[in-house]
Image (spheres, grey):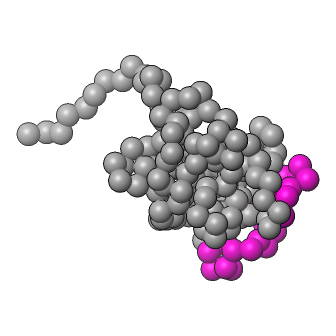
């Protein structure tokens, strides 16, 4: 299970909600490109860097993205707990950042990581393992 970061070098939240328009520690041109939801968050798709396996989806505000870009570890903003958390701080299931990309619309991030252990809080490798939905598979025309 992942928890909030206790690093003394990073400011700790006091339960505040992220602000959609407040200037953050990001370069202005990057902050301007982000399209946030009504809570000020951007979806972050987490992918294993060498296999392409999609591991999980998390949420980031400007501070979480700043921490992710500058520390080599992934930080999220928890929508349910309203606080920052760095993946693996208590579980050891760390996500080491390999690259970060912003999609063409600015409303999603792709964070490629080297995942140690399970990515999901349930203990599975990904948050999608064993959770397939019935769907009709399409086929490309011949």
For image coordinates 47% across by 62% down, the residue present is: 98
Residue 68 placement: quadrant: bottom right
Residue nearest the observer in this picture, 4 or 64 = 4
Res 37 seen here: no
Confirm whether the magenta stretch covers residue 140.
no
- In the image, is 109 to the left or to the right of 53? right
For image coordinates 58% across by 48% down, the residue present is: 94
For image coordinates 63% across by 80% down, the residue present is: 29
Residue 99 pos. (x, y %): 48, 64
Residue 72 placement: quadrant: bottom right
Residue 47 pos. (x, y %): 45, 49
Residue nearest the observer in this picture, 74 or 100 = 74
- In the image, is 57 to the left or to the right of 50? right
- Farthest top residue in view: 134
- What quarter of the picture does the N terminus occupy? top right
Please tell me whether residue 48 is drawn above or below residue 126 in the rendered image. Answer: below
Please tell me whether residue 122 is drawn above or below residue 69 in the rendered image. Answer: above
Residue nearest the observer in this picture, 99 or 102 = 99
- What quarter of the picture does the C terminus occupy? top left
Prevalent SS, magenta region: loop
Residue 12 pos. (x, y %): 85, 58
Res 67 seen here: yes
The boundaries of the magenta stretch are: 11-31
Please tell me whether residue 27 is drawn above or below residue 36 in the rendered image. Answer: below
For image coordinates 47% across by 53% down, the residue present is: 114
- Farthest right residue in view: 14
Please tell me whether residue 78 is drawn above or below residue 73 in the rendered image. Answer: above
Residue 120 pos. (x, y %): 56, 35
């Amino acid at each position: 299970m992942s928890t909030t970061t206790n690093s003394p070098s990073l400011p700790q939240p006091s339960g505040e909600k992220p602000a959609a328009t407040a200037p953050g520690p990001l370069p202005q041109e990057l902050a301007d490109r982000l399209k946030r939801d009504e809570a000020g968050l951007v979806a972050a798709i987490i992918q294993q860097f060498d296999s392409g396996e999609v591991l999980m989806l998390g949420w980031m505000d400007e501070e979480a993205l700043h921490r992710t870009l500058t520390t080599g570890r992934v930080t999220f903003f928890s929508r349910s707990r309203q606080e920052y958390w760095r993946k693996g701080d208590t579980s050891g299931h760390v996500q080491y950042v390999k690259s970060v990309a912003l999609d063409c619309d600015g409303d999603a991030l792709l964070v490629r990581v080297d995942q140690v252990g399970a990515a999901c809080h349930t203990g599975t490798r990904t948050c999608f393992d064993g959770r397939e939905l019935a769907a009709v598979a399409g086929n490309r025309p011949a």
